[in-house]
Structures are given as structure tokens and as C-alpha cells.
Image: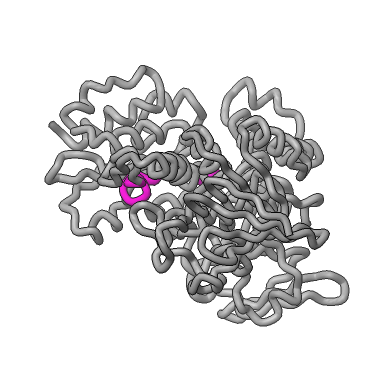
Amino acid sequence: METQAYDVIVIGAGPVGENVADRAVQGGLTVAIVERELVGGECSYWACMPTKALLRSSAALRAARQLPGSREAVTGELDVAAVLGRRDSFSSNWKDDGQVSWLESAGIALHRGQGRIKAPKVVEVTDVDGTVVTLTARHAVVVATGSSALVPNIPGLREANPWTSREAASAKDVPARLVVIGAGVVGSEMATAFTALGSSVTLLARDGVLPPAEPFAGEMVVESLCEAGAVVRTGAGAEAVSVSRDDNGTVHVETADGERIEADEVLVAVGRTPNTQDIGLDSIGLTAGAWLVVDEALRVVGADDWLYAAGDVNRRVLLTHQGKYQARVLGDAIAARAKGEPVDTSAWGRYAVTADERAVPQVVFTEPEIASVGLTAAAAEAAGLNTRVVDYDLGWVSGAVLHAEGYKGRARMVVDEDRKVIVGFTLAGPDVAELIHAATIAIVGEVSLDRLWHAIPSFPTISEVWLRLLETYGR
């Protein structure tokens, strides 16, 4: 059995693993990365990139139809084959040659196969042909294996061969009828995408649509989906209690209130589960299949100081960009420790991941788009903050009126009254995704409201909502 030694071993070559490895290499360390599927991970092939490609064409068509002149130039409906073809190109046709080339150029050694921890700082990699290579780490092992779609124990569901986010993102055809179970980000975005592509969509939202967001965000998405022809069922009665697929391929979904829905496919989007079932956690006294609890330095609790976890697998924030943020910090910190340099993990320090707790940005690419960062009003109240909530109708902003006829949107800022800084910000409206980074900077920088009065938005842009919110708040 071949044995190879590196400074750092990273299990999982998705965007999080790639970033950890890259930063460690830039810090002067040697790194091996282990991947059992495609280099680039979930985001590149079955999540962020292909799903946004599915959504973008319908968003562009909607924008054209909302303006005189361009509206008249629209002579047809979406070309579904073209949309799917563009999606394929963004997922590199599910080939990872480009990402493998990048690893090589970055000086990162790739080992394909299933990586399993066998002992402290020892990882065994088994390739599909049964070849086994043992890797040893001088300094650290990082688990960056991500998460997979959770399939709940609904009677008959697994036997019905449901779609998960992977099948939805890589679908070769558009089903005539689609039932979506769960209305978080994946469920809401895919309901939006497949409705636009021509499916008759029923969205079962037991806990509401986008439940962690500000309530008005979910309400606006529901209104938009219904206007587009989708059916949205909310509340306890919308819970799926049984699923079956008959000999003709038709899926039958029964809800808690007794409704029976027929569809050609059923998409399950009710959460995620960690990819830790077969990575050797039990060999070091941890529980296989469990989320990995980490400390402020991203060290795995219950293991010695050689084992770290970044990205979805540590359950801090299940977002690609936030996982990459953790990865950059962690790669730098591992390199610093290897050199004997001090590592400061205090709030907002170079080696801290403070934004995980205070300033997580997110965009949901539904119609309308939902962009947020920081705390919702409810979360701020639950945290014990003395807050004031300020809302403004985006449709009253000159830039929004120019952007689209009948523009509907809303902005909310949550102010910490004791410090006079923003701790939460949400935008709901067409094409608001690119506006959220200004709020992210304001929250991370803890910019006072008095100073924000001097940040003048250009006229006429939708960003003028910042001035309107400050005016509503008052000086």
C-alpha cells in the first residue's frame, strides 16, 4: 500500500475544499485534496450555478415584458431547449476537466476516491478500482465534504424515486406536472424555475414559504408564483403524508388534509444532511453521519487539534459563499500555525469567522428576488437587541419606477438602537440581488447611521432606497 505525506489533507474538493487547499498552498504548505465525485462539488454541478442558469432566462424575459418597447419586441415564449442547453454549459456538462486543471495549476495534489480517516492525521483513499493510497498529514486534516439533500421518512417516498435538488438542477426534460415538497430556498427557486419552463407546479409549504426570511418576502413570492399559475399550499395541512408512483409513472401525493395530487415528478426540498457517513469518523471516536461541531477556530469538537471542518458539514451556515469565507480563513490559519505565528480568532480578526454569526448575506433567485443580510426583525428581538424596524416601499423609488412598470418591492432595515447601527437588511423586488452588498458592508463595518447619511446614492437608481430608509428613520 502506497503512503504519501503532505502538510495538509482536505477531504472534499468542492468550492470549500478548493479554497482551503489554495490558501494553505499560498501559505507555503503542501496539500492533498480527496474527491469521490466531481472536482468542484455540489455548487458547480447540481446547485448554485446550474440552478441560477435555469432561472436567469425567465427573469430576463420578465424584465423585457415589464417595459414598453421591449415588451412589443417579445414574440414568443421561453425556448426550453436553449435554457437547458445554457444550464448544461454552466455545469460544464458534468465534467470536471477545467477544475482539475486549476488544481494542477495551483499546486494541489488530487487523489480521487473515497477518503476515510483511519487514525489521527491519517487518511486512506480508495479509488473506484479498489486501489488504496494512504495519506499522512504533518499539520492538519480538513473535512469539507458538504451536505446532501435530506429525504424524509414519508411513506412511499423513497420507492417513488423522487427528485432531489440534484435531479431538478440536471433535469433533461421539463415535467408537465411537478409537486415540490418544501418551500425553503431550493423549493421556492425550483418552483419558480419550473413554472416558468412550463410545468404545472404545486408547492407544498407546511412551514410557509421561505420561513427564515422576513414574512413579507415569502408573501411576495407566493403572490408571484400564484400569478404565474403555480398552486401554493401552506400550513400543517400541506404536509405530505404519503407518496406513491403507479405503473404508468404517475406520482400520487396525499397531504395531511386529505388532498390527493397527481404529478409526473415529485421534488423533495426539506433540508440537508451531512456527508459524513463514510469518512471514518468512528475511527477517532466521532459519530458517523453526524454534523461536525466546531469551535471558533473551526476545529472539530471531540477530536484533537489536527482536525477541522469547513462549509456545510459544520452546519454553521449552509451557503457556498459562507463556506468559502470559512475556507479562506481556515487555510490561512493552518498555514500560520504551521509557521508558529500567532492566530487571533477574536471578533472580526484575520482568523475569525465572525460574519457567520452577524452578517450572512443571501440572495434567493425567486420572482421577486429576495436579498438579505444579518438579522431579521424577529431574530434581532429574540437576541435581546433593542431595535427599531424601518420599512420602505421600493415602488416609490424613482430608480424602481424607471426599472420596470408596476414595480413591486419592499425594503427593511433593522437598527440596533443602542449602538445606532444596522444589524439586518432585507430587500424584496425584481433584480435586487446586486443591491445587498452595500448593506453587508454597512453591517460588517458597523457604520453608524450618522455616517450613512454621507453615503449618497446616485440618482436615479434603486439604491436611493437607502436615503428613503434613513429619512423614514429620522435624524
Locate residue 232: give its quadrant: bottom right
Task: Please state if 12 lies on the left or on the right of 214 as rendered.
Answer: right
Q: Report the residue that reaches farthest toward the top.
A: 459
Residue drawn at x 33%, y 42% as measured from the top left: 425
- Evaluate whether residue 455 shows in this view: yes
The x and y percentages for residue 454 are 22, 21
Locate residue 76: give its quadrant: top right
Q: Is 175 located above or below residue 270 in the figure?
A: above
The x and y percentages for residue 257 are 56, 80
Q: Is 97 located above or below residue 198 in the figure?
A: above
Whether 355 is among the magenta residues is: yes
Front-most of 396 and 352? Answer: 352
The span picked out in magenta is 353-365
Residue drawn at x 29%, y 34% as measured from the top left: 442
Q: Is 81 located above or below residue 182 in the figure?
A: above
Quadrant for the N terminus, please: bottom right
Whether 63 is among the magenta residues is: no
The x and y percentages for residue 223 are 51, 51
Residue drawn at x 27%, y 30% as measured from the top left: 468
Q: Is 285 located above or below residue 189 in the figure?
A: below
- Evaluate whether residue 212 shows in this view: no
Front-most of 149 and 11? Answer: 11
Residue drawn at x 57%, y 26% as measured from the top left: 67
Task: Please state if 369 lies on the left or on the right of 65 as rendered.
Answer: left
Quadrant for the C terminus, please: top left
